[in-house]
Image (cartoon, rainbow, N blue to C red):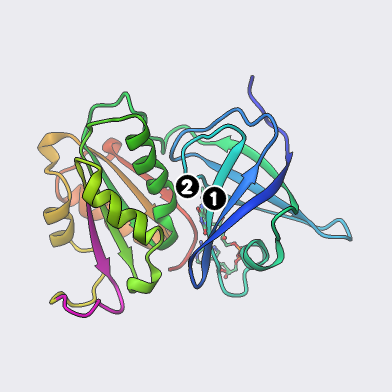
Amino acid sequence: MKRTGWWVARLVDRRDETATSATLVLEVPDWPGHLPGQHVDLRLTAEDGYQAARSYSVSAPADGNRVEVTVQRVPDGEVSPYLLEGLSVGDQIEVRGPVGGYFVWRATDPAPVLLVGGGSGVAPLMAMIRARREADSRVPFRLIYSVRSERDVYFADELRRRARDDRGLDVAYVYTREVPEGLSAQAHRVAVADVNTHGWPAQLEPVNFVCGPTGFVEAVSDILVALGHEPRRIKTERFGPTG
Ligand SMILES: Cc1cc2nc3c(=O)[nH]c(=O)nc-3n(C[C@H](O)[C@H](O)[C@H](O)COP(=O)(O)OP(=O)(O)OC[C@H]3O[C@@H](n4cnc5c(N)ncnc54)[C@H](O)[C@@H]3O)c2cc1C
């Protein structure tokens, strides 16, 4: 049965990811489940009845009635600061979804996968990485994760562990502002050389998932097209106007 309405959920847990982001764990009664890559809409209602809704990708695979999202604080934003600072464990919030059927990875697809995430755009890609492990899939996955600095890496410990233990998963970081000590690379935005080195050749017909701020997604998609990837094998999700 397709669910179209708003459902009252409860925040049951939260985990800080970085100084400006956190994962929120919601319990949604009768949740029908979701696929990695899908998103939910969250809606807040003020005492005077004013409502605001925003979309957030699920960052973990389906797990009963639990829905996890990972939210970046947008300075002066209307909804994200409230989700991170105004909502406490036990509070209610309305949820709609799951939404989306295109930007989705299915464990039955044997094609190699390149994930390219910018900032909070790693959230749905993390759901795919976790779902791959849960499905015991051997599909080769590569993640290129663009972040300002090491301090801005979401899921840092888990990614380190998975890059070591999940066979067939490679993780590469591109630092846009501050490169960790000991690395020789210069700070830069994802460029052709990064995608060439850490992505798949177009001849292997991988599926490429690109997610992040609008400008990031457009730049990376252009690089993939220039490297010969068919546009239909480049799946994109745009989070918002700026970095
Ligand atoms: C399909 C989809 C999935 C998304 N998934 C996630 C997710 O998993 N995690 C997450 O943190 N966000 C996600 N977003 C972005 C999210 O929906 C909100 O846009 C974001 O939280 C900002 O909302 P706000 O109310 O705080 O800011 P607003 O009050 O809407 O905007 C405040 C200011 O910030 C600018 N702005 C709006 N959105 C962004 C943005 N994303 N980045 C930078 N500047 C912005 C606006 O232009 C405005 O100037 C997703 C968006 C879409 C469309």
As helix, strand or loop, the secondary structure at mark 2 comes to loop
Look at the image and tell me in which quarter the C terminus lies: bottom left
Spot occupied by residue 47 in the image (x, y as percentages of width and height): 87, 60
Which residue is denoted by mark 1 in the rendering?
69
State yes or no: Cβ of the residue under disc 2 lies below 8 Å from any atom of ligand 1. yes
As helix, strand or loop, the secondary structure at mark 1 comes to strand
Q: Amino acid at mark 2?
A: Ser
Q: Quadrant of residue 175?
A: bottom left
Which residue is farthest right? 48
Instruction: Decide: few, some or many residues near mark 1? Use Cα within 10 Å; few <14, some 14-19, many ≥20.
Output: many
Name the side, left or right, on which 146 lies relative to 50: left
Q: Amino acid at mark 1?
A: Val
**Image region (quadrant) for ligand 1:** bottom right
User: Looking at the picture, does residue 41 appear above or below residue 138?
Assistant: below
Q: Nearer the viewer, residue 215 or 200?
A: 200
State yes or no: Cβ of the residue under disc 1 lies below 8 Å from any atom of ligand 1. yes
Name the side, left or right, on which 234 lies relative to 131: left
Look at the image and tell me in which quarter the N terminus lies: top right
Instruction: Decide: few, some or many residues near mark 2? Use Cα within 10 Å; few <14, some 14-19, many ≥20.
Output: many
Residues at circles 2 and 1 in contact by the CB criterion of under 8 Å: yes
Name the side, left or right, on which 5 lies relative to 106: right
Spot occupied by residue 182 in the image (x, y as percentages of width and height): 16, 78
Q: Does the magenta-highlighted stretch encompass residue 36?
A: no
Residue span colored magenta: 170-183
> Residue at (63%, 31%) from the top-left corner?
31
Name the side, left or right, on which 188 lies relative to 197: right
What is the number of the mark on residue 34? none
User: Looking at the picture, does residue 184 appear above or below residue 171?
Assistant: below
Which residue is denoted by mark 2 in the rendering?
59
Which residue is farthest top? 1
